[in-house]
Image (spheres, rainbow, N blue to C red):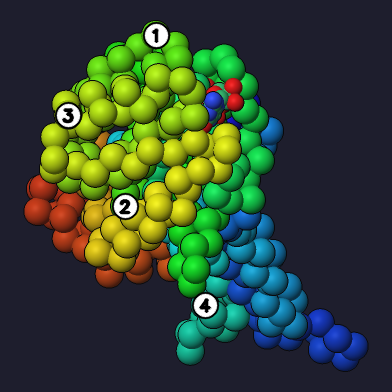
């Protein structure tokens, strides 16, 4: 089974909670605060791995999470940071946010690391809340809890050369002769079920060739293996278009050539700009030479047609010369051009105020989530700290702007209090 599209869930690590703790040792009754900060949650990266050729690994494991940050400890001990997670993917893997379809990254080069999710920040320990007036804070901050994200991985194979043509024209046979690849070869259609890659060395040049199977008439609308493999044609610099010049299956080679091109161009018009080397295979079969003459006539002088016998390895050198020469004139492949989508870490300074049916002022938004996560309700210091934050972030000012009166109810998460000037 070839897998070139997969949905998975990824999550960066939560931040570790800060510690609330006080110095304790013999002879000291009430030592000062010494609670350390929580550790940062681990980040999630995708990494290009040239040894991988499909997304099969993701068929078996769908959930990926970086390590959580550890809690802070007494004696100002910092919590350990969570381990980063590196997810290895084949080159040409495009990672998208599943809900919006926006592109997070295109992993193009071997060893390339792409950061997609940052770990949650660790909470501050109570030491950090000491001030000249607050010597013994009985509160600390919680670490940031991160959200899992649903992403789609899509493999758009990167190859210098794409081999294409109707089923059984000899694509895999050719690939097996020019590279170390050992694809399955047989006299029935759709022998090859996934794009095979091979590395070809020709004199001092080497290039990657992909056997792109499954193309038949109607492929761009889903016939045969259809669309599945057309996306692998998008990222080739050059196409080797193979026809069975012997017409061994009763089809006209020129008809085949036109049909395959129609499928390509109706899938993506831009493929018209990808140069093609036309190869007439199975020249060893009786009658093929006559067909070649007729084919050349229909193709016209503009295009060169190279006759070969893949099975007998004849004409291969001429073909590789042509491929290699053409490749030299073509620019290298580049990653997709796109605007990188980044998951937002909510801006914890933002809030909104709504009125509920009882007329109470309800404060909502990321700022509130932050405050609620951190407040210790039965601790006066903690409540005072929350009040100060509300003032500093402009919540009281906004309430006044809305006409809040002394004694009105203000709701923040689960906390309700009367507004006092
Ligand atoms: N006579 C002759 N037969 C060939 C030649 N090249 C391939 N064949 C035969 O054609 C049949 C199909 O070859 P494959 O290489 O599997 O064809 P393919 O294009 O990869 O086919 P799919 O994977 O089904 O798309 C096999 O039986 C091959 O032995 C050739 O040059 N001459
Ligand atoms: Mg094949």
| Label 4: few (<14), some (14–19) or many (≥20) C-alpha neighbours in 10 Å | some
Q: Which residue is mark 3?
A: 297
Q: Position of residue 313 (x, y in %)?
A: 55, 43
* Crowd band around label 2 with a 10 angstrom C-alpha radius: few (<14), some (14–19), many (20+): many
Whole-Å distance between the Cαs marked 4 and 3?
86 Å
Q: Are marks 1 and 3 in contact (CB under 8 Å)?
A: no
Task: Give the mark nearest the N terminus, 2 or 1.
Answer: 2
Q: Does label 2 or label 3 sit earlier along the sequence? A: 2
The quadrant in which residue 358 appears is top left
Q: Which residue is disc 2 drawn over?
A: 237
Cα separation between marks 1 and 3 = 19 Å
Please tell me how crowded label 1 is: few (under 14), some (14-19), or many (20+) other residues with Cα within 10 Å.
few
Query: Under 8 Å from ligand 1: the CB of mark 2?
Result: no
Q: CA distance from mark 2 to mark 3?
A: 27 Å
Q: Is residue 91 above or below residue 1?
A: below
Label 4 residue SS: helix
Mark number, residue 250 = 1
Q: Tell which of 31 and 74 is nearer to you.
A: 74
Q: Position of residue 5 (x, y in %)?
A: 48, 33
Residue identified by numbered label 4: 129
| Kind of element beneath mark 1 | loop
């Amino acid at each position: 089974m070839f897998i070139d599209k997969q949905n998975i869930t990824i999550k960066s690590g939560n931040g570790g909670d800060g510690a609330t703790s006080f110095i304790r040792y013999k002879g000291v009754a009430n030592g000062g605060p010494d609670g350390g900060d929580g550790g940062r949650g681990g980040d999630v990266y995708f990494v290009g791995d040239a040894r991988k050729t499909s997304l099969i690994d993701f068929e078996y494991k769908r959930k990926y999470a970086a390590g959580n940050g550890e809690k802070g400890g007494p004696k100002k001990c910092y919590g350990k940071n969570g381990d980063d997670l590196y997810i290895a993917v084949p080159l040409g893997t495009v990672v998208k946010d599943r809900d919006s379809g926006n592109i997070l990254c295109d992993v193009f080069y071997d060893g390339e690391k792409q950061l997609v999710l940052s770990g949650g920040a660790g909470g501050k320990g109570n030491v950090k809340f000491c001030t000249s007036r607050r010597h013994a804070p009985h509160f600390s901050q919680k670490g940031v809890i991160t959200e899992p994200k649903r992403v789609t991985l899509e493999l758009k194979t990167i190859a210098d050369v794409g081999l294409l043509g109707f089923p059984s024209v000899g694509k895999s046979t050719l690939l097996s002769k020019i590279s170390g690849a050992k694809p399955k070869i047989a006299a029935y259609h759709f022998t090859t079920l996934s794009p095979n890659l091979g590395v070809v060395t020709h004199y001092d040049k080497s290039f990657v060739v992909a056997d792109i199977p499954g193309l038949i008439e109607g492929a761009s609308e889903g016939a045969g293996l259809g669309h599945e493999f057309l996306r692998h044609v998008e990222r080739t610099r050059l196409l080797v278009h193979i026809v069975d010049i012997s017409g061994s299956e009763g089809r006209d080679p020129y008809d085949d050539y036109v049909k395959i091109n129609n499928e390509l161009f109706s899938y993506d018009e831009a493929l018209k700009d990808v140069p093609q080397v036309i190869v007439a295979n199975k020249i060893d079969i009786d009658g093929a030479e006559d067909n070649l003459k007729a084919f050349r006539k229909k193709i016209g002088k503009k295009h060169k047609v190279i006759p070969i016998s893949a099975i007998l390895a004849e004409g291969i050198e001429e073909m590789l010369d042509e491929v290699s020469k053409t490749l030299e004139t073509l620019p290298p492949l580049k990653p997709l051009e796109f605007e990188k989508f980044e998951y937002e870490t909510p801006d914890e300074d933002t809030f909104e105020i709504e009125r509920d049916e009882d007329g109470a002022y309800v404060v909502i938004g990321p700022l509130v989530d932050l405050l609620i996560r951190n407040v210790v309700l039965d601790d006066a210091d903690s409540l005072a700290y929350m009040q100060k934050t509300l003032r500093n972030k402009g919540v009281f000012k906004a309430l006044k702007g809305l006409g809040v009166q002394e004694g009105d109810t203000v709701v923040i998460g689960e906390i309700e209090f009367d507004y006092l000037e």
